[in-house]
Amino acid sequence: MLVTGGAGYIGSHAVHALRDAGRNVAVIDNLSTGFRFAVPDDVPFYEGDIADSALLARIFAEQGMGDGSGAIMHFAGSIIVPESVAKPLYYYENNTGKSRGLIEAAVAHGVPHILFSSTAATYGVPDVSPVTEQTPTQPINPYGWSKLMTEQMLADTAAAYPLNFCALRYFNVAGADPQVRTGQSTAGATHLIKVAVEAALGKRDAVSIFGTNYDTPDGTGVRDYIHVGDLAAAHVLALDALIAEPSRSLTMNCGYGRGFSVLEVLDAVDRVTGGRIKRVFAGRRAGDPAKLVADSALLRATVPWTPRFDDLETIIEHALAWEEKLPTLRRSAA
C-alpha cells in the first residue's frame, strides 16, 4: 500500500488509520508542504516526487506491489484555491499532469486499485444543498478543474485497463488525530477552524469573515465540517470496497450532511477556549457559495462508515490540542 503525500495533513491521518487497521503502508512525499514528523518512524518513507517514474518502480518492487496486487492512496497535490487562480499552469502540472504519470505507472506495473483525494470544488457553486454526486460538476477555478480532470483520467483508465478507483470528494476537513499523533501543520493555512484555533492561541491577531450578507440564518457562509479522523476511516473502508469488487469504481461525497456558519464556528471556538476571537468583517470572496453541505448517503450505503467525531466542539478540541503541540514538534524537527 503506497500513500502519496503521506506526510501532509489528510495523507498522514490516512497512514495512521491504515496502520491502526493492521495494513502494511509506505509513503512517498517530496516534503514541499508535508512534514517528516507526521509519518511514523517505522513506516517506509521515500522522499521524492510522484513524477519520478523510476522511484515509483523501485517503491512498487520493494513494497511487493504490482502484478495485480497492491493499492495507491493518492493525496499528493496542491490545494489552495487563490493560488490556483494565480498559478493555473502549476496546478495543472502538479495536480493533473503528475497524477497522469502516477496512473500510468500503476497501469504499467499492474497496481490494480487507486483511491483518489478529490474535492467538493469539483461542483463549483452548486445551486442545490445538500450536494449529491449527481449534482453537475462545474468547477470555477483551476484547483477544482485539476481534480475533476484527474477523476476523468481515472474513469477512462479504469474502462481500458484492469484497474478500479474511488474518488472521494471532501467537503471542509478539520480537526486532528485524537491521539495527537498528527494534524494540520502548514504555516499560513486558510482552513477556518485551523485559522480560528491559531487566533485563539495568539498566533493570529484576528479572523477575517468574508461576506455577511449571504442568504443564511446569520448572513455568513455555511459549510459542512468533517473530522479528519472520520475522513481517514472512510478511506480505509473505501479501499476495502475497491478490493472486494475489482470491477466497480466509485465516486462519493465525504461530509456529515449538516453545516455550520462562520460565526457559529467562531462562537464554538470561544466556548471551547473560554476566550473571545477578534472578528474582522470583509467583503465576499469571488466564487464562495452561500452554503455547501454534502449529501453523504452514497458513502454510508456503500461502506460501513459510522462517524465517531461528528461534533463541532470535538473537532475544535482536537484541532486545538494539535496546535498546542505543534511548536514543540517544529523545534525538534529543526
Image (cartoon, grey):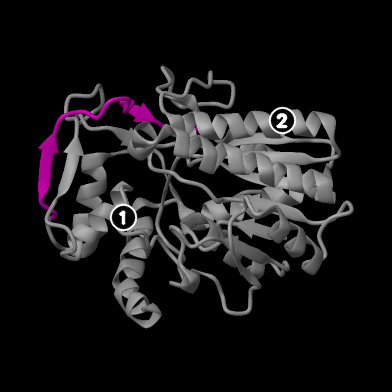
Callout 1: helix, strand or loop? helix
Q: Residue at x 82, y 65 (%)?
A: 64
Callout 2: helix, strand or loop? helix
* Occupied quadrant, residue 162: top right
Start-end of magenta stretch:
277-295
State the residue position of label 1: 194
Residue 70: in sight, yes or no? yes
Q: Does residue 166 lie above or below 285 as drawn?
A: below
Residue 113: in sight, yes or no? no
Task: Out of 150 and 58, give the one closest to the viewer.
Answer: 58
Q: Main secondary structure of the magenta part?
A: loop
Q: Is residue 38 magenta?
A: no
Kind of residue at disc 2? Ala
Kind of residue at disc 1? Lys
State the residue position of label 2: 155
Residue 98 lies, in percent from the top left, at 60, 43
